[in-house]
Image (cartoon, rainbow, N blue to C red):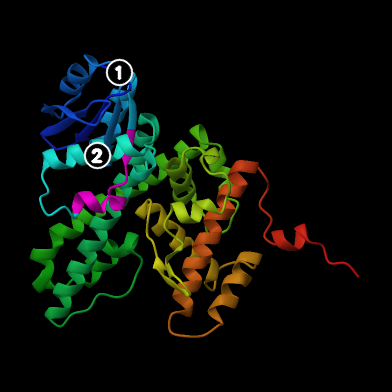
Amino acid sequence: MSKDITVGLDLGDRYSHICVLDGEGAVVEEDRVRTIPEAVRERFGAMGPVLVAMEVGTHSPWVSRVLTELGHEVVVANPAKLRMIYQNPRKSDKADAMMLARVARMDKALLSPIQHRSRETQQDLQLLQTRNALVKTRTQWINHMRGLAKALGYRFSKCAAPTFHKQAVEELPDTLRESLGPLLELMETVTARIREYDKKIDRLGQEKYPQVEVLREVPGVGPITALAFVLTLEDPKRFAKSRDVGAYLGLVPRRDQSGETDKHLRITKAGDRYLRWLLVNCAHYILGVHGPDSTLRRWGLARCAQGGKTAKKRAVVAVARKLAVLLHRLWSTGEIYEPFYEAKAKPVTD
């Protein structure tokens, strides 16, 4: 086969469906292959260089790497941009594969291609993802225990999540000790594991990603947020302008413009949800009582002062967006963080 051939690959958990189009757009083959590396390598290794289109998903990172190694051109589509696929009234795996192939043959840009991270970066990112899963589990347990206690007329005192198991043991009523005691023991183990992951993440940033230290100069940005930012973006040169990072992480408003009507809606929430959540938490700290004075803080507080029920929420999101832009700027240029960067760039003259 040649580069005139276009292949649509609809990835499934067990089997993936294939649709092959020739240079004239005619279907020359429809087949399926097991979604395992050996089967994919054997099936596509027999082809010459072709264009393969697939949707992003659980298996798309390793499948795209295998196909690229075999010499194929791979386009990984953003499914949110393909209404013609997920809103198809006659949707099926075979129809999805054919639609991917036809759209890729017409114009690859219509697929809104995404770029997968390297295998090494993906493995390092799993440290953060696993820690986040443990933190969520601990939070669910705490909420569960507080709810059970309130249902029986008891109440645990407020405290930080890492110390909840210690304080709860002292306040735990005898009537709940049998049912909640084992859960507190598990919570103590999970908290210890979270601390271990914190140390691993801090060590990984120091030893392998020196740019993390540059980002941590910004108050409120800790080792987890800095490392997540580096691993998620992977390469600062992917963005022509630092302000493009805000849109990439879904921190810009949606837009509905037609004629003289131009509506500004909620943020798009595109991109990595975990990193967006971390940046929003950093924004809360920057605008909070413990946030040190800076240009970014003053700008955010001015947005809060505009009033309205949603002023604070909008200000937090806006600060998170500007923080993302700032972090990319520091990373790409290697500049030292200056809290009052605008005043330094534009000195006051008499």
Checking the image for residue 69, the label placed there is none
Residue 289 or residue 349, whichever sits in front: 349
**Residue sitting at x 17%, y 74%:** 147
Image coords of residue 208 (percent x, y) = 49, 32
* 1 or 2: tag closer to the N-terminus: 1
Q: Amino acid at mark 1?
A: Ser
Measured along the vertical axis of the image, is residue 100 above or below residue 305? Answer: above
The three-letter amino acid code for the residue at tag 2 is Leu
The residue at the point 51 percent across, 72 percent down is: 315
Query: Taking the image as drawn, is residue 25 in sight?
Result: yes
Q: Nearer the viewer, mark 1 or mark 2?
A: 1
Q: Secondary structure at mark 2?
A: helix
* Residue identified by numbered label 1: 2
The segment highlighted magenta reads 75-86
Which residue lies under the disc numbered 2? 100
Tell me if residue 80 is in the magenta stretch: yes
